[in-house]
Image: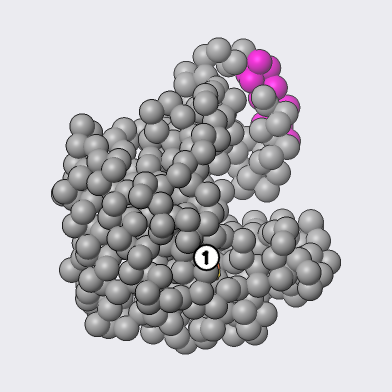
Amino acid sequence: MNTPLHGGLGIYIHVPFCAVKCGYCSFCSVGWSGTKAEGYVQAVLRNIRDCSDTSRPADTVYFGGGTPSLLRPEQIAEITGELRRCFAVTEDAEITLEANPNTLSSERLTGYLEAGINRLSIGVQSMDDDELRLLGRRHTSARAERAVLDAVNAGFENISCDLMLALPGQTPEKAERSADMLASLPIQHISAYLLKVEDGTPFQSRGMEERLPDEDETSDIYLRTVKRLESHGFMQYEISNFARPGYESRHNDRYWLCEDYIGIGPSAHSCCGGRRYAVPPDVDLFISSPAQITEVTDENPCSPEEIVMLALRLKCGLDLRRVESIRAGIEKKIPALVSAGLCVFDGQTLALTPEGFLVSNSVIAHLI
Ligand code: SF4
């Protein structure tokens, strides 16, 4: 088991617009406004010029949100063009755009490809229309399928879809059905997240937390979905991520391996130059500021403890040579975790099993 290390730099662009706010969502986003979006794009371009760095290769770019696919292809092209002028974006850089199925016409998809996007992450969430309604999503499973097929016809060869698990009323069988339907589409990657009711969301005020499956049902849903996705060739490489071989997300790996990335946009985080910092989640402030305001959130990132925490999210696990200073303490605790079926250890690399992923927070707290 080898830990992949890429080096280089990643760039994250946060696009803070959504057509409708989903009841479970706590990400930074506001309603769509064409004028505001134009101001936002200009602010992104200013900030790209501001943190220009051509000293090392930038091999991943990620447009997240929000709903980046609300921006027109020409707006995305303006941003990717400026990125190529101000950063050493590599020829084979992975450039991802998060997209809502409802926004993806064939024409738009072709435009995004021309703008340099080579990976799409489509917010499908479920292939069950009742679940989609419950989540407040405006698309149907048929619309999601159409979006995937249109993307393939437009020429996309690297498509990811999101799937939400442990929804109110969801049974393992329902989750498996969604996983089967999604896995039968011509896609290469699936992100499967457990629904968490976040503070301050409409889901919380509607008491959704009480309607979630209990702990045993949740672990059943998760473990059966992992198995199901793997039986379709989508191999788990991280707690929530599954890919056909060779299609693991390079940008996401960067977060888990403590590699440098720069974030641009309201609420965007960066880990660069030995510090972590964040932009306040204020869209108007981001648009009106000559340069984005950043607040340092960590003066000493990538401590051995943090390396353990992040690397153990990966199926390939943690090479203990990365944390020599705390290795002895960790090694003492491994045998009990292995006996409990929560970890595997080959003498050098420690990795969680799917059962271990389910209780990763307590396993990690125990180790460090
Ligand atoms: S579309 Fe995505 S970012 Fe926007 S509100 Fe829904 S979940 Fe949140």
Q: Which residues are magenta?
A: 329-340
In this orientation, which residue lies closer to the viewer: 54 or 120? 54
Task: Indicate yes or no whether the magenta region holds residue 331.
Answer: yes
Q: Tag 1's secondary structure? A: loop
Vertical comparison of 114 with 81: above or below: below
Q: Main secondary structure of the magenta part?
A: helix
Q: Considering the image in quadrants, where does the N terminus appear?
A: top left
Residue drawn at x 32%, y 83% is 105
Q: Is residue 73 left or right of residue 294?
A: left
Question: Is residue 58 visible to the viewer in this orientation of the structure?
Answer: no
Query: What is the quadrant of residue 79 in the picture?
Result: bottom left
In this orientation, which residue lies closer to the viewer: 310 or 78? 78
Query: What is the quadrant of residue 50 in the picture?
Result: top left
Residue 226 in picture, x, y percent from top left: 57, 57
Ligand 1 neighbours mark 1 (CB distance < 8 Å): yes
Q: How many C-alpha atoms fall within 10 Å of the one at disc 1: few (<14), some, or many (≥20)?
A: many
Query: Which residue is disc 1 drawn over?
Result: 29
Residue 315 in picture, x, y percent from top left: 51, 42
Residue drawn at x 70%, y 44% is 359
Picture quarter with ligand 1? bottom right
Please state which amino acid type lies under the numbered disc 1: Ser
Vertical comparison of 347 with 240: above or below: above
Q: Is residue 294 left or right of residue 136?
A: left
In this orientation, which residue lies closer to the viewer: 155 or 290? 290
Vertical comparison of 238 with 95: above or below: above
Give the mark count: 1
Task: Indicate yes or no whether the magenta region holds residue 328.
Answer: no
Question: Is residue 7 visible to the viewer in this orientation of the structure?
Answer: yes
Residue 304 in picture, x, y percent from top left: 55, 22
Residue drawn at x 60%, y 42% is 353
Query: What is the quadrant of residue 308 in the picture?
Result: top right
